[in-house]
Image (cartoon, grey):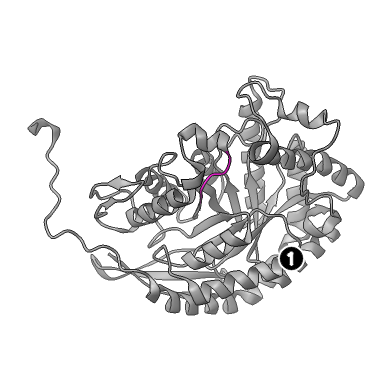
Amino acid sequence: MVVPSLAIVDDKDCTARPFWLSATAEGAKLALRTSLGCQMKIGGFYEHQLPRPWTRDSEHRLLKNALEQVELADRYGYDFIWATEHHFLEEYAHSSAPEIFLAACAARTKNVRLGHGIVQMPPGINAPARVAERIATLDLISDGRCEFGTGEGACEVELGGFNVVQEEKRAQWLEGLRVAVRMLVEEPFTGFDGKYVTAPARNVVPKPFQRPHPPLWLACSRRETILLAARLGIGALTFSFVSPEESRQWVRDYYSTLENECEPVGYAINPQIAMACPFLCDRDETMVREIAHEHHGFFMYGLGHYAFFGQHEPGKTNLWQNYKNQTTPIHIDDPLARGGQRNCIGTPAQIREVLKGFEESGVDQVLFLSQAGNIPHELLMSSIELFGREILPEIKERDQKQARAKAATVERLNEKLLNRKVKRPVAPSAPTIIRAAGHH
């Protein structure tokens, strides 16, 4: 059993370090770096979009380019890299094994935190034991830089591919999450018999570097799921593109619900709200906005195709061709259609102003969505470099001034909310003895 204490500020590197006491090594303290502590972080987000036509080398080059971008982002001081998990979503998301991509990122980076944005938790897609094993292994390989984002999955193309019923996906997500988190913490895991998961007593190894477990998150597209994340004491990864002013109320609602209604699903809370935002940075505003309009437009079209209006034939439907050949454009709530207030596309000066608005609204992290459509790799690299040179240093300087206040808030919430957590099941009175196959 691992017993939590409260976060303690380390001003030197602007992080809050939780200390844990292990019952098996009384008094031994393990200091683990977490994502908490600074006021607003910057993250990069990857769907691995790949519009047709494809060549034999297309997917190979896509992933290699993404790894180059991640290395550059790490050098310039990005705080997070996130990779989604989607299945069968041709052209829109070729990111079906994010744990492999993030492990490759871990080998190429030193500081950036590595986020699953998200792991699809219905047990028919990912068995809880396999999730716990992969999360712990990534956390160990990365020296404690893993973030455990979770979600339900969305569209019928992928959920139906694993025979997950749409109406049951949320219940499956929550049951799978509860079991996986227990597996990360319990020694041994004492077993579970639920509606969607049946798992016998086993000691799931390895255990994560961060104790009790990496920070937990939930993918959110509506206010309803943001409040659900708050009630469970986990971070909200928000993929609705809203302006800084619109995000202000979402932040208020999240933190108010967290403080007043939270019953933690994990063994440490992760009080954070992150907002996704289209990103592309260049001194030529006209050029960068034209490119973004076309290729981020494809991102929104692909989302609509799989989630709302499309009729998809696997291996046949050409999403990019359909997007380009629209005779009557389908109306989509496009964040680029409302000018610069809902996105970070433009010159350094324009992006600086948008990010100041997000900071003032209380957002903890902005997730840059830049790899969309066929945006050239060279432009993605130059965007990271220009942003990293001219904007990111001042954001980090402001963040450091807020570190103590943020850490004090986390400490207070930890103390208050972890007392509400429902007690874990008591270990069975009889030991679990498993006979080797040779006995049968």
Tell whether 210 sits left or right of 365: left
Q: How many marks?
A: 1
The answer to whether residue 314 is above or below residue 79 is above
138 relative position to 68: left or right:
left
Residue 199 percent across, percent down from the top left: 28, 46
Residue 120 seen in the figure: no
Which picture quadrant has residue 397? Answer: bottom right
Q: In which quadrant is the N terminus drawn? A: bottom left
Quadrant containing the C terminus is: top left
190 and 112: which is toward the camera: 190
The magenta span reads: 151-155
Label 1 Cα crowd, 10 Å radius (few <14 / some 14-19 / many 20+): few
Q: Is residue 196 left or right of residue 249?
A: left
Give percent across and percent down for residue 15. 54, 69
Instruction: State whether the magenta stretch is mostly helix, strand or loop.
Output: loop
Vertical order, 185 against 54 (above or below) = below
The reply to whether the magenta stretch includes residue 152 is: yes
- Provide residue 49's location: percent of width, then percent of height: 67, 36
- Residue at 49% x, 76% y is 413
Residue highlighted by disc 1 = 246
Decide which of 367, 294 is in the foreground and name it.
294
Q: Secondary structure at mark 1?
A: helix
Mark 1: amino acid: Glu
Tell me if residue 301 is in the magenta stretch.
no
Which residue is drawn at the image coordinates 61% and 40% (left, top)? 67
Query: Is residue 297 visible to us here?
Result: yes
Q: Residue 154: image x %, image y %?
A: 57, 44
User: Which residue is farthest left?
Assistant: 439
